[in-house]
Amino acid sequence: MVRVTWSAFALGAVAVACSAGVGCSGAYVAEPRPGGVPEGTREPDQATAGAYGTRSIWAGVYTDEQADRGDGLYSRSCSTCHGPELRGGEDAPPLKGNDFLRWWYGKPLSELDQLIRVDMPADNPGGLNGRQYTDVLAYLFRENDYPAGEEPLSEDPEELHEIMIEAGGGED
Ligand code: HEC
């Protein structure tokens, strides 16, 4: 089975988009750092055979209760690097707005979920439990203006694979 190194993939994507003139925010420069982000791996897309992207993130795919819990978890586990307002810091990218979301448009939730589960927090990868990662994800969606709904966000990668991250969130 081919395994893709996420960090290498992410760094490549940053370089390509900048040279294509899509715009670089400039605040965060993705460079390999000594003792930096541990290398994580993720399964390629084919590993999850759900009905790819058949639901929209706009349908209300998490609950406010999850996002409320995720709020506290974010403050404890993520804000030191990504900033209290999710705007990023010297060494970490923003998790809010178009600078963050444009990488994710057209991708299933499962990919963002896997990145966070495998690589984050960068100083303690895998340091949260399954439900906590899902709660943090719900918080990120609420902060990016995607609506809450009645059904809680699932921890099941197959179900997350069905939900598509669509444009329009995080406006400002
Ligand atoms: C010790 C600092 C640190 C902490 C704590 C941390 N991160 Fe990160 N995070 C980073 C760095 C650095 C990157 C960029 C990695 C890269 O480019 O390969 C990153 C990247 C990300 C990305 C990808 C961003 C993008 O542009 O697609 C997400 C999502 C993310 N982090 C979420 C989280 C969440 C959620 C938490 C808390 C559970 C967290 N991070 C905690 C440093 C941190």
Image (cartoon, rainbow, N blue to C red):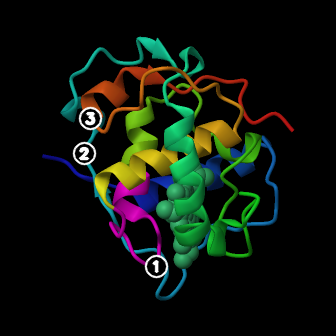
Which sits in the foreground, 107 or 32? 107
Identify the residue at image location x=44%, y=33%.
109
Residue type, mark 2 in image = Glu
Q: Earlier in the sequence, mark 3 or mark 2?
A: 2
Quarter of the image where ligand 1 sits: bottom right
Which sits in the foreground, 48 or 82? 82
Magenta residues, as a range?
115-128
Q: In the displayed structure, would residue 81 be above or below residue 10?
A: below
Q: Is mark 1 within 8 Å of ligand 1?
A: yes
Q: Residue furthest bottom?
A: 34
Q: Which residue is mark 3?
A: 156
Mark 2, secondary structure of its residue: loop
Identify the residue at image location x=60%, y=73%.
31
Q: In the displayed structure, would residue 59 be above or below residue 135?
A: above
Using the rendered image of the protein, determine whether residue 32 is visible from the camera's viewpoint: no
Q: Is residue 104 magenta?
A: no
Q: Which residue is mark 2?
A: 43
Residue type, mark 3 in image = Asp
Marks 3/2 in contact by CB < 8 Å: the verdict is no
